[in-house]
Image (cartoon, helix red, strand yellow):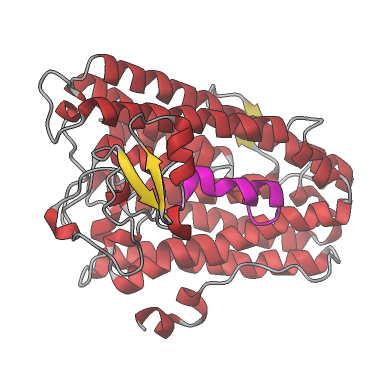
């Protein structure tokens, strides 16, 4: 039922950004950038409000652990992902967002840093001294030769552990740390099923796997930080916020920022690192929302965000629809055929992403689709990868048409040199 609900929401969101040909509007770059910032502010406000709802659901889970409160917390996490993922197109071109993003969405993570793991996970890693540090079980830690007092798990403690030892996989905060604490490891490989952490992992009276009080403290600390971090971005994208001021300071640079976000997310990040890499390796560990099996919705909402940045449209979590001067309007006035071309490609991406999401609801999860030997599933995932690559080429043509000069888009070894990923 939960997955069907999310699919319905995603379908509605996809429909809300579908291209409809309209007469060219007179749009000035500054007005386009003001609206781009206003939409960013709205998206981060929605991400914040849903994170606050998640925080309250976590309070209820900790206060009274049960199947029902765990399910509600998981549903709140899934709901919180949708608006956040539609903000990701603000990355890559906006340094304020790039400098901040790792606190909330870093992945993949070595979950042994946080909590207990299955024996198959192993006990050590040459690349990570904190591979099985298990903060929840250990009130004393040593990091870089320094003794850390972890007797009380607080937001400050887990923030200090983020990227411990300068290892990126030591992710101690953000959506994916919370996801792991709500679902646990997905031990199914490319078989059916997501993580299946029992609610009794939070039940102090009937505790499973030990340290139920500390596990609750960790989960609460992580949701507290998520709310704080998203509040930072809401303020940054307010009318007088630092991100808004930076975008408006130079219209040409501001337009480049929009297109850098669109192109880099389309190509290097989404088509490459998030999709093609996992497909090449047939590895479920390379899927983004790997504990919850929510990856299909993550990819779909990233694609919706890319279209939103071009069209200046956004449907808020309360159903309110935003629209205003857009990059599409600027391109249409300059080269109507190019605007039609890019809009058609954005629609093709959204359509194939929706097919993938619907398959995840009705047939098999994303990690099953990328399994070796799954010809049909692999093809369903490959289709939006091809679409994302195609739309990036049109984004590059838009950059040239608007005479924005050199705009560097993120690449990906998975696309540019696929043989390298096997070395």
The residue under the point 21% across, 28% down is 212
Tell me which segment is drawn in magenta.
Answer: 91-106
Tell me, yes or no, if residue 174 can be seen here: no
Residue 103 magenta: yes
- Compared to residue 405, the image places residue 333 above or below, namely above
Query: Which of the pair 118/398 is nearer the observer?
Result: 118
Residue 62's spot in the image, x, y percent? 28, 20
Horizontal side of 278 relative to 348 (left or right) equals: left
Query: Would you say 359 lies left or right of 21 here?
Result: left
Residue 364 is inside the magenta segment: no
**Viewer-proximal residue, 359 or 222?**
222
- How many numbered marks appear? 0
Q: Quadrant of residue 369?
A: bottom left
Q: Is residue 44 visible?
A: yes
In this rendering, would 188 be left or right of 228?
left
Residue found at x 57% / y 69%: 390
In the rendered image, residue 48, in percent from the top left (x then y), is placed at: 55, 28
| Relative to 172, residue 375 above or below | below
The image quadrant where one finds the N terminus is: top left
How far across and how far down the image is residue 31, in percent? 85, 40
Q: Is residue 72 left or right of residue 248?
A: left
Residue in the picture at 81% in, 51% down: 254
Q: Main secondary structure of the magenta part?
A: helix
Q: Nearer the viewer, residue 158 or 4?
A: 158
From the top left corner, tell me how far across and down residue 147 is, in percent.
Answer: 39, 46
Quarter of the image that includes the C terminus: bottom left
Q: Quadrant of residue 407?
A: bottom right
């Amino acid at each position: 039922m939960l997955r069907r609900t999310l699919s319905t929401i995603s379908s509605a969101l996809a429909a809300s950004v579908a291209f409809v040909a309209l007469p060219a509007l007179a749009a000035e770059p500054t007005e386009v950038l003001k609206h781009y910032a206003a939409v960013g502010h709205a998206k981060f406000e929605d991400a914040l409000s849903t994170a606050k709802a998640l925080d309250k659901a976590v309070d209820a889970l900790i206060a009274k652990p049960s199947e029902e409160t765990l399910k509600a917390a998981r549903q709140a996490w899934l709901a919180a992902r949708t608006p956040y993922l539609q903000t990701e197109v603000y990355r890559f071109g906006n340094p304020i967002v790039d400098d901040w993003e790792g606190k909330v969405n870093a992945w993949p993570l070595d979950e042994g840093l946080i909590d207990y793991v299955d024996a198959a996970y192993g006990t050590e890693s040459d690349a990570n001294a904190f591979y099985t540090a298990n903060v929840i079980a250990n009130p004393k830690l040593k990091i870089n030769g320094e003794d850390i007092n972890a007797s009380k798990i607080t937001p400050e403690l887990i923030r200090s552990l983020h990227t411990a030892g300068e290892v990126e996989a030591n992710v101690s905060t953000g959506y994916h740390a919370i996801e792991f604490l709500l679902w646990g490891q997905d031990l199914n490989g490319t078989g059916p099923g997501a993580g299946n952490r029992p609610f009794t992992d939070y039940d102090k009276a009937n505790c499973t796997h030990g340290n139920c009080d500390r596990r609750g403290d960790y989960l609460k600390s992580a949701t507290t930080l998520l709310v704080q971090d998203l509040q930072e971005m809401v303020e940054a994208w307010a009318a007088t916020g630092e991100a808004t001021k930076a975008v408006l300071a130079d219209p040409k640079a501001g337009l480049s920022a929009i297109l850098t976000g669109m192109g880099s997310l389309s190509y290097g990040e989404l088509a490459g690192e998030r999709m093609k890499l996992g497909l090449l390796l047939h590895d479920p560990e390379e899927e983004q929302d790997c504990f919850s099996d929510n990856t299909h919705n993550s990819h779909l909402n990233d694609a919706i965000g890319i279209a939103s940045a071009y069209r200046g449209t956004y449907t808020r979590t309360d159903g309110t629809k935003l629209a205003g001067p857009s990059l599409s309007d600027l391109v249409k006035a300059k080269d109507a055929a190019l605007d039609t071309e890019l809009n058609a490609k954005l629609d093709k991406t959204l359509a194939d992403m929706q097919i993938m999401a619907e398959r995840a609801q009705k047939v098999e999860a994303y990690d099953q689709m990328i399994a070796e030997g799954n010809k049909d599933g692999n093809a369903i995932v490959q289709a939006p990868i091809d679409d994302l690559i195609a739309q990036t080429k049109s984004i590059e043509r838009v950059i040239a048409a608007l005479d924005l000069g050199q705009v560097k888009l993120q690449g990906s070894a998975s696309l540019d040199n696929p043989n390298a990923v096997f070395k």
